[in-house]
Image (cartoon, rainbow, N blue to C red):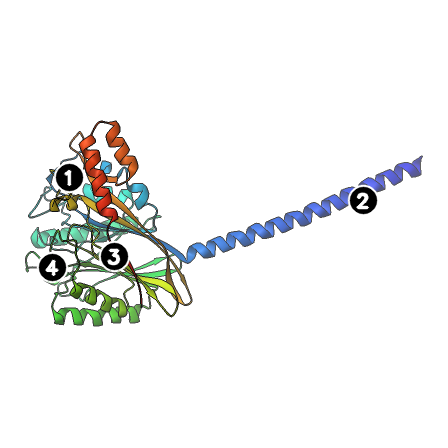
């Protein structure tokens, strides 16, 4: 009896031991596998970068007459927040000591750009033809405000950067060096156009002359060489006609020279309408690795304050639409490559409360307009959607 009980106990112990060993190795195997996977994900994420490029953020009287500026971005902020960095051009001084002011001499108070920042925008050009609308006071107060915001947000999950204005007169063209994940990014914003020539010594100003262009080509080459950055993003406020969708041959040739001298992404604005874009690939590496956006239109403005709903092809109607261009990049030892691009077209919609808000140019918005019996708006938006979606996107291998 004793022997039998002992045998049974020993058998049970052996079984328990085997089960324990199996569980141990299974758990070790599972842990190892999960650990390897998580490391792979981290490494992959470090080498990836997602960007959104918008257009001009403007504040005409209908825009700043709103009581709650966060409403502007309510229906588009999910796109903006898809990115590590979302770029926009602030087309106005930011001076809290002055009232809001509309065209021709703009001024914003801080709550307007703060609403854009809270929506997800975090890299801004502050240099354009309206940067000196409020003279030297406006320039210096804009610089002070941008420095304050950068300082306040630099240790947050979404730091904020500004470029284009310089506190010291006759400074060399400035640029930001941004470190994110394993990326070293250079961002430089310049303007070719001024509404007035005073105080340009405080600007990243590149005259659109043969000499000015050649000097700047040499300068960007110097920046790329000295910084050895992974990614060089250049914002250009162009001296091009407003409200024109075509791009000149001269402009294209100049921008390609900038790419050949170290710039990776050119993000241009000023025409206030969406223009074509180019994605450039390297034949030798078989990788797409450069981008030019000639103009992304108005992200928000009051330029289309009285839309001609029965004439969606009218020239002024184009000022109510904008492009949010999504770009996903990856880098390795051989350089960067573009993994994904996607255009998100948006429009400035005037709701029944006479509020100017951004909306996605998509079928859901058209269906909504029909449901609330704004059928003229629905037909108009359908046409504007078709027009925007016909914008050229050229892939060029060289």
Q: Earlier in the sequence, mark 3 or mark 2?
A: 2
Q: Is residue 37 left or right of residue 318?
A: right
* Crowd band around label 4 with a 10 angstrom C-alpha radius: few (<14), some (14–19), many (20+): many
Q: Earlier in the sequence, mark 1 or mark 2?
A: 2
Q: Quadrant of the C terminus?
A: bottom left
Q: Tag 3, which secondary structure?
A: strand
Residue under numbered circle 4: 193
Label 4 and label 1: CA atoms lie apart by 24 Å
* Crowd band around label 3 with a 10 angstrom C-alpha radius: few (<14), some (14–19), many (20+): many
Where is residue 54? Give x, y as percent. 24, 50
> Which circle marks residue 63 in the picture?
1
In this view, the mark in front (1 or 2) = 1
Q: Is residue 377 left or right of residue 230?
A: left
Where is residue 15? Give x, y as percent. 79, 42
Where is residue 204? Give x, y as percent. 16, 62
Label 3 and label 1: CA atoms lie apart by 28 Å
Q: Tag 1, which secondary structure?
A: helix
Q: Earlier in the sequence, mark 2 or mark 4?
A: 2
User: Number of callouts in the render?
Assistant: 4
Label 2 and label 4: CA atoms lie apart by 85 Å
Q: Quadrant of the N terminus?
A: top right
Label 3 and label 2: CA atoms lie apart by 71 Å
Q: Tag 4, which secondary structure?
A: loop
Is there CB contact under 8 Å for labels 4 and 1? no
Q: Earlier in the sequence, mark 3 or mark 1?
A: 1
Q: Earlier in the sequence, mark 4 or mark 1?
A: 1
Q: Earlier in the sequence, mark 3 or mark 4?
A: 4
Residue under numbered circle 2: 14
Residue 242 in sight from this viewpoint: yes
> Which circle marks residue 277 in the picture?
3
Residue 68 in sight from this viewpoint: no
């Amino acid at each position: 009896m004793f022997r039998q009980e002992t045998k049974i106990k020993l058998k049970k112990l052996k079984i328990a031991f085997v089960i324990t060993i199996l569980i141990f190795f299974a758990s070790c195997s599972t842990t190892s596998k999960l650990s390897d996977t998580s490391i792979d994900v981290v490494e992959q994420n470090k080498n990836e970068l997602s960007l959104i490029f918008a257009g001009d953020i403007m504040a005409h009287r209908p825009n700043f007459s709103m009581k709650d500026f966060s409403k502007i971005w309510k229906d588009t902020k999910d796109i903006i927040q898809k990115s590590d960095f979302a770029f926009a051009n602030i087309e106005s001084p930011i001076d809290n000591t002055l009232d809001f002011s509309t065209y021709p001499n703009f001024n914003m108070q801080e709550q307007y750009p703060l609403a854009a920042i809270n929506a997800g925008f975090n890299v801004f050009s502050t240099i354009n033809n309206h940067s000196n609308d409020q003279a030297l006071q406006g320039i210096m107060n804009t610089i002070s405000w941008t420095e304050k915001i950068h300082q306040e947000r630099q240790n947050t999950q979404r730091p904020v950067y500004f470029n284009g204005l310089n506190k010291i007169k006759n400074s060399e063209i400035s640029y930001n060096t941004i470190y994110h994940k394993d990326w070293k990014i250079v961002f430089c914003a310049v303007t070719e156009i001024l509404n007035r020539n005073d105080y340009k010594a405080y600007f990243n100003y590149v005259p659109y002359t043969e000499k000015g262009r050649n000097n700047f080509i040499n300068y960007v080459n110097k920046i790329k060489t000295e910084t050895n950055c992974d990614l060089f993003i250049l914002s250009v406020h162009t001296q091009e006609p407003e409200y024109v969708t075509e791009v000149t041959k001269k402009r294209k040739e100049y921008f390609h020279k900038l790419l050949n001298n170290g710039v990776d992404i050119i993000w241009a604005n000023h025409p206030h309408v969406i223009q074509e874009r180019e994605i450039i690939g390297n034949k030798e590496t078989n990788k797409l690795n450069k981008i030019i956006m000639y103009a992304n239109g108005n992200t928000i403005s009051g330029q289309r304050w009285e839309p001609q709903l029965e004439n969606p092809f009218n020239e002024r109607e184009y000022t109510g639409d904008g492009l949010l261009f999504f770009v996903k990049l990856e880098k390795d030892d051989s350089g960067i490559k573009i993994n994904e691009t996607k255009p998100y077209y948006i429009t400035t919609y005037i709701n029944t409360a006479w509020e100017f808000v951004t909306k996605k140019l998509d079928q859901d918005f058209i269906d909504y307009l029909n449901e609330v019996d704004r059928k003229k708006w629905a037909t108009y938006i359908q046409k504007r959607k078709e027009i925007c979606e016909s914008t050229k996107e050229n892939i060029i291998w060289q």
